[in-house]
Amino acid sequence: MTTVPPPVEDPSFSLAGTREPPRRVLMKGNEAIAEAAIQAGCDAYFGYPITPQAELLEWMAKRMPEEGRAFVQAESELGAINMALGAGAAGARVLVSSSGPGVSLMAEAMSYMAGSEVPMVLINVMRGGPGLGSIGPSQSDYFQAVKGHGHGDYRVPVLAPSSLGEAMEMVATAFELAEHYRTPVIILADGIMGQAMEPVEQHYRTPPRQTASWALTGADGREPRVVRSLHLAPEELEEHNAHLQEKFRAIAEHEVRWAGERLDDADLVIVAYGTAARVARTAIARARAAGLRVGLFRPISLWPFPSAELAGVADRTRGLLVVELSAGQMVEDVRLAVAGKVPVAFEGRTGGMVPSPDEVVEALRELDATGSSRRARRVRRRPPIPVSGADHMHPHEPMAEPETGHDALSIFGDDAWMPHWYTVPVPTHPTRNGRGRGHGRNGSAERRRGDEGGTR
Amino acid sequence: MTATVPAAPRVIYQRPARLTDVSTRYCPGCGHGIIHRLVAEVLEDLGVDGRTIAVAPVGCSVFAYEYLGYDWCEAPHGRAPAVATGIRRVRPDAFVLTYQGDGDLAAIGTGEIVHAAARGELITAIFVNNGIYGMTGGQMAPTTLVGQRTTSSPTGRDVRAAGYPVPMTEMLAVLPGVAFAARGSIADPSAIGKTKAYIRKACEAQIRGEGFAVVEVLSNCPVGWGMTAQESIRYLQDVVVQTYPLGVLADRRAGAQSGAARPGTPPGTARHAENRPAGQEA
Ligand SMILES: Cc1ncc(C[n+]2csc(CCOP(=O)(O)OP(=O)(O)O)c2C)c(N)n1
Ligand code: SF4
Ligand SMILES: [Mg+2]
């Protein structure tokens, strides 16, 4: 049994002539990720519009035909993901992107792809759920991505970038993993990452193709190939599952990714990924200024989760604080990893709200003082107050800085810019139990429509 | 006595090369086997065997890959046209076929087939309409006849609760992206001959880049219908065709009288195949 196929170049997909892009530019997250995929050799993109990932689809609509690659705006996410299944089975390097409601529709085909070992990369630009939820940034699809998504015994690698540059590099890595292990791979981004503009260094990488030995090309002068997940005889399916499980073990052994910051002298450690890790970084700077020695443990692969590595770090600390844009999902994996060795506290916001660095500092203080996980599950409930006047601004005009307090972009640094219609409310004055005053970059104006309360 | 030299043997009938020599899992008398054979004969005649990538449905013909020796991709129930779209867009030099039942195409996969047809996707759909969900035990399908008894319409399909049969191919035929749409049957040799001619035209439409093509084939399901094989054939001849008349429903191929066909590879298709010499593939 070959768990991992040897890399073989596939001559049938040639990238000759791909336009060389400019090196350092200001790009919107969704667009930068899309271009990175093109430069990484993406042969086919299939999508369906949904906020906050629509610009990814729009970029592909323009660029893919320009490069002579496949692009279809599908009739639904069901259509998109099944087109991806077909193109992936035919050996192409395939990208699909969506957000929560659409990703839910993709669960069935993801399970088929895992079962029939079809490589594909799915980017989920997460928004608030459940249901239609909100279009605000969120990390509430962690369970969906990491714990299964569709039916059956399977796992897929899940990668979480926390900056645009990292996301761009990650697309190439994701294609590589997908083809090497013959598996779908999920990249979990969120609305802030998709919507914010950041200056990006464009260092692109095009991994070699690895699909030629099994891809469907037409059975000309060779045995027919069948890409399938059906194994009707229980013994046969069990054997196939054993093969898949062995592959998952190989991934768990070789593909753990994480980053640590300021861990050397840390008494307390924040565990956070993606946008939450950027909030955490700001919070750590403030906490250190106030005399708390805090470090950051940032899982980059959410599956496989860096459990052993985190347990090792936890051994040298007095407590962990998990920060998420969710009601507490990754925190379960953190608790499993440290197995009660140190207290694990949680700080999270939901619905499209982003925890402020000060909230995180406060949670750190409490963890420091009590050494307990009393804040085990703390999800704030505090309505934002939109900035008045912002609704009238032109969609492409940068916002004036708000007069007071923290704003979501401070976690991205001074160079970043957020479209005014994109709601990223962050409380300005976190209070322990009262209602803090918050503001959005612009309330709830819908993109290009400006009316209140609509959904896309 | 004059010695006669025997003439060289001439093959007048044989198994198509890609029709595998195995006994199928189909029930005795089931029409799927005949339709498989027609597909194999046509693709062989057209010389596309070696570049065919077929998409299997979920239904009794889920094992089609055991019976027809092409490259196959299995699709989730109803999604074959989307899977075929993905294949065709990245391998524009392939011949891409979906083989789907009526539950697959006319119920759960309605969206996928309609939009593949609307896009004029260069694929050919073989739509086997036996008016029932054969594989799951003979439940009512959208195509089940009014009054027809199934395991989920035990007193017969009642239009007040279950509505009317869906004339899927007529509905697809109105779309300008459809180059060819027809309905045949496997009820008798003459009908089978016509069905084969329809399948041929539907495949040629793809080969010439004229658009989407679908052939609905009225088939039987003796087990699901609760009949003997012979009864089921008579039912097909006498009753089923009343609801589903046979014939060509749309012909917009370039050679046809009224045409909207736009031959060529659509934009949004991978370009690589144009530069690739035939047979270079792995
Ligand atoms: C999502 C999903 N729903 C339901 C099923 C169960 N199922 C398998 S085959 C089938 C019906 C197939 O009927 P049809 O397409 O008419 O094919 P036939 O067996 O009659 O040839 C159903 C409902 C499934 N496999 N997947
Ligand atoms: S159940 Fe019906 S369609 Fe299925 S194999 Fe038997 S006769 Fe054929
Ligand atoms: Mg049927």
Image: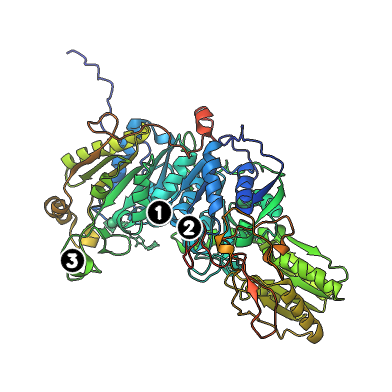
Residue B16 visible in the picture: no
Residue A456 image point, x, y percent: 47, 61
Q: Nearer the viewer, residue B112 or A162?
A: A162
Task: Spot the residue most to the left.
Answer: B238
Query: Hey, what amino acid is under mark 2?
Result: Ala
- Residue A100 vs residue A294: left or right? left
Do tag 1 and tag 2 residues touch (Cβ < 8 Å)? yes
Q: Are marks 3 and 2 on the same chain?
A: no
Q: Nearer the viewer, residue A345 or A226?
A: A345
Numbered label attached to residue B101: none
When the figure is inspected, residue A102 is found, relative to residue B253, above or below; the finding is below
User: In the rendered image, which quarter is residue A20 located in?
Assistant: top right
Residue A195 image point, x, y percent: 61, 57
Question: Mark 2, residues whose alpha carbon is within 10 Å: few (<14), some, or many (≥20)?
Answer: many
Residue A77 visible in the picture: yes
- Residue A371 vs residue B182: left or right? right
SS class of the residue under badge 1? loop
When the figure is inspected, residue A169 is found, relative to residue A352, above or below; the finding is above
